[in-house]
Amino acid sequence: MSVAHHHVLIIGSGPAGLTAAIYTARANLKPFVIEGEPSSTTDQPGGQLMLTTEVENFPGFPEGIMGPELMGRFREQAQRFGAEFLTEKVARVDFSQRPFRVWTHDKEFTADSVIVSTGAQSLMLNLPNETALVGHGVSTCATCDGFFFRGKEIAVVGGGDSAVEEATFLTKFASKVTIVHRRGELRASKIMRDRAMANEKIEFKWNSQVVELKGASSLEGIVLEDTVTGERSDMDVAGLFIAIGHKPNTGLFTGILDMEDSGYLVTQPGSSYTNIPGVFACGDVQDHTYRQAITAAGSGCMAAIDCERWLEANHA
């Protein structure tokens, strides 16, 4: 089996990976992007924006743009400058020596450098029509979608800092925000709990879990189940924000790249360098703070520049 070699190999094709591809392509490094498989929930080409409807907060699109269209434009721009793409999923990597080795299910590649941009996925409720309703009343990002629910009643699922932070932010738009939590008290820090309790727009549904999403083409309400009694009740809401955590797509790199306890890749402060020289990480796979398309794109730019300079310094 012949093995293709590349100066730069990029794993993942969300805003971070595609921005890295644009920059490295313009630097004449001929990046090779293994973009994932359309059937995969964790390695989908284009990343999480492929599951988003209208994006209104990405600079340069005052009228908004559909998530898949935005990612399509990113990809076309990278191709214009010479980036190559393979629509497959990476199965295994070996970063123990250079050149680095990367395998898909039936191909092997080597590379002088690797940029990891495999992203993260929001933890979901795993309800039957949940995926179909994402972008149609169901969301995992208050910063992205809160504006669409101005003057409406919405619910937030979760009990940690992220859920309370999302709920507090959403009170800027919604007429009422109900935090649905499966326990009888929040897990959030005291300052976040106090802030939520003091907000007159926030109400609580304790010992409750969402067991059904009503509506076919858009969310029409939710069904709650009491975790103590099992009793069910309907709640009319225009939006449901799921804030039960995120999981970075880092399984490929366990025992290879340094990670936080939560699984996010560790990069050197102010850079995209991982613990292995020549391997860089960008986007949501190493960012558990912002998780925005624009910040992912920015870190993809950082990774490309770091990679270019590293290759030049190492004469690779």
Image: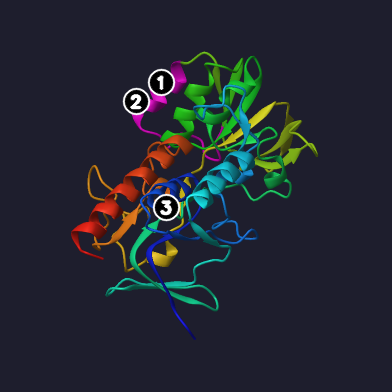
Q: Residue at x 72, y 44 (%)?
A: 132
Is residue 191 on the magenta stretch?
Answer: yes
- Secondary element under disc 2, as helix, strand or loop, is helix
Does the CB distance between marks 1 and 2 fall below 8 Å? yes
Q: Residue at x 55, y 15 (%)?
A: 201
Task: Find the magenta span and give its range.
Answer: 180-198
Q: How many marks?
A: 3
Relative vertical location of residue 257 with respect to residue 80 in this rendering, above or below: below
In whole angstroms, how far apart are the C-alphas of marks 1 and 2?
6 Å
Q: Residue at x 39, y 27 (%)?
A: 192
Percent of width and height locating residue 28: 38, 55
Specify the amino acid type for callout 3: Ala
Q: Residue at x 41, y 20 (%)?
A: 195
Comparing 102 with 33, the one in front is: 33
Q: Is residue 32 left or right of residue 239?
A: left
Q: Residues within 10 Å of mark 2 (few under 14, many from 20)?
A: few
Specify the amino acid type for callout 1: Arg
Does the CB distance between marks 1 and 3 fall below 8 Å? no
Q: Nearer the viewer, mark 2 or mark 3?
A: 3
Q: Which residue position is annotated with label 1?
A: 195
Q: Nearer the viewer, mark 1 or mark 3?
A: 3
Q: Residues within 10 Å of mark 1 (few under 14, many from 20)?
A: few
Relative vertical location of residue 206 with respect to residue 96 in this rendering, above or below: above
Could you say which disc has been placed on residue 191 in the image?
Answer: 2
Percent of width and height locating residue 83: 48, 56
Specify the amino acid type for callout 2: Ile
- Secondary element under disc 1, as helix, strand or loop, is helix
Q: Which residue position is annotated with label 3?
A: 25
Evaluate whether residue 205 shows in this view: no
Quadrant in the rendering for residue 87: bottom right
- Secondary element under disc 3, as helix, strand or loop, is helix
Percent of width and height locating residue 11: 45, 60
